[in-house]
C-alpha cells in the first residue's frame, strides 16, 4: 500500500511541510488567498453587538453634585437614617453620639438636635431608674486601698471620692464637676461594678 505523503492532497489535515519541502507553520493558510482566509466579522451575537454599541457611547457625566462626592462620604440623609435607627432600637447612647457628630458639622440641623435632646433625656431617665432615686445615699463597697484597681479616670475617681455615706446622689452630681449625663453614667457604672452600695 502506498502511504500518503505529508502535504499531499489526500490528507484532510494541514501538513507541516510545504509543497517546496520547507516547514510551513501556518498550516497551509499562507498559500490561501486573502479573500479565502477566515475573517473576524461580527457574528450577529446580540451581546457582542450591544458591547460594540456601548463602547461607542460617550462616558456618563454626573449631573447631581452629590454623585461627584468621594466614595464613602456620608450624606445627611444616611446620617439621619442611622440616628433614627439607633433611637428606634433603644440605643440612645449611639443615637446621641451620632446626633452630636452631625450637629458638629451642621449646628442648624433641627432633626439631629431633636434626637440629641430626646436621647439625652432617655438616658438620664434610664440611669436614674437604675440608681433608684437621686435622694439615696451611697458609700464605698470596696476597701479604699483597692479603689486604684478599678482603673478610673481622674474625673470618675473624684466622683467616687464624694461617695462618703453622707452625701446624696443629687449632691454628688452637683459637686463632681462633670456633665450631668456623664456623672449619672459613671455613677451607674460604679454601681454595676459593685464599687458602691446604698446605705440610706
Image (cartoon, grey):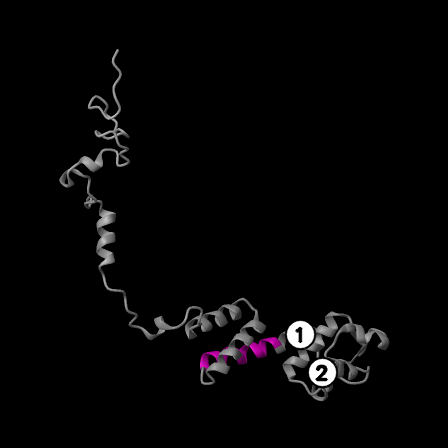
Query: Which of the 4 quarters of the picture holds residue 53?
Result: bottom left
Give the overall secondary structure of the magenta segment.
helix
Residue 132 in sight from this viewpoint: no
Q: Residue 73, image x and y in percent?
A: 44, 72
| Residue found 22% across the figure and 47% down from its top | 46
Q: Position of residue 5 (x, y in %)?
A: 25, 21
Q: Considering depth in this image, is 115 or 37 the residue closer to the camera?
A: 37
The residue at 36%/73% (across/down) is 66
Q: Element under label 2?
A: helix
Left or right of 36 in this view: 183: right
Q: Secondary structure at mark 1?
A: helix
Question: Which quarter of the image is occupied by the C terminus?
Answer: bottom right
Q: Which residues are magenta?
A: 110-123
Name the image quarter holding residue 195: bottom right
Does the magenta run of residues contain 25?
A: no
Q: Quadrant of the image for the N terminus? A: top left
Q: Earlier in the sequence, mark 2 or mark 1?
A: 1
Foreground of the two, 103 or 173: 103
Query: Which disc is residue 129 wearing?
Result: 1
- Image point 52% across, 71% down: which residue? 87
Dot label at residue 155:
2
Question: Could you say which disc has been placed on residue 11 in the image?
Answer: none
Q: Residues within 10 Å of mark 1 (few under 14, many from 20)?
A: few
Measured in 3D between alpha carbons, the distance from the residue under mark 2 to the one under mark 1, in whole angstroms, is 23 Å
- Furthest residue toward left: 35
Residue 32 image offset from top left, x and y in percent: 17, 36
The answer to whether residue 82 is above or below residue 55 is below
Amino acid at each position: 500500500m502506498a502511504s500518503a505523503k505529508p502535504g499531499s492532497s489526500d490528507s484532510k489535515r494541514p501538513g507541516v511541510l510545504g509543497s517546496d519541502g520547507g516547514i510551513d507553520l501556518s498550516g497551509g493558510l499562507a498559500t490561501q488567498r486573502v479573500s479565502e482566509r477566515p475573517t473576524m466579522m461580527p457574528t450577529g451575537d446580540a451581546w457582542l453587538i450591544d458591547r460594540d454599541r456601548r463602547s461607542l457611547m460617550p462616558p456618563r457625566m454626573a449631573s447631581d453634585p452629590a454623585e461627584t462626592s468621594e466614595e464613602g462620604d456620608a450624606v445627611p440623609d444616611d446620617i439621619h437614617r442611622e440616628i433614627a435607627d439607633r433611637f428606634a432600637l433603644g440605643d440612645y447612647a449611639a443615637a446621641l453620639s451620632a446626633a452630636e457628630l452631625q450637629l458638629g458639622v451642621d449646628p442648624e440641623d433641627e432633626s439631629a438636635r431633636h434626637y440629641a435632646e430626646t436621647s439625652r433625656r432617655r438616658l438620664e431617665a434610664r440611669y436614674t431608674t437604675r440608681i433608684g432615686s437621686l435622694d439615696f445615699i451611697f458609700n464605698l463597697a470596696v476597701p479604699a486601698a483597692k479603689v486604684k484597681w478599678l482603673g478610673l479616670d481622674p474625673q470618675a475617681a473624684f466622683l467616687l471620692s464624694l461617695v462618703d455615706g453622707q452625701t446624696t446622689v443629687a449632691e454628688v452630681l452637683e459637686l463632681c464637676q462633670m456633665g450631668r449625663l456623664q456623672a449619672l453614667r459613671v455613677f451607674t457604672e460604679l454601681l454595676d461594678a459593685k464599687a458602691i452600695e446604698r446605705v440610706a
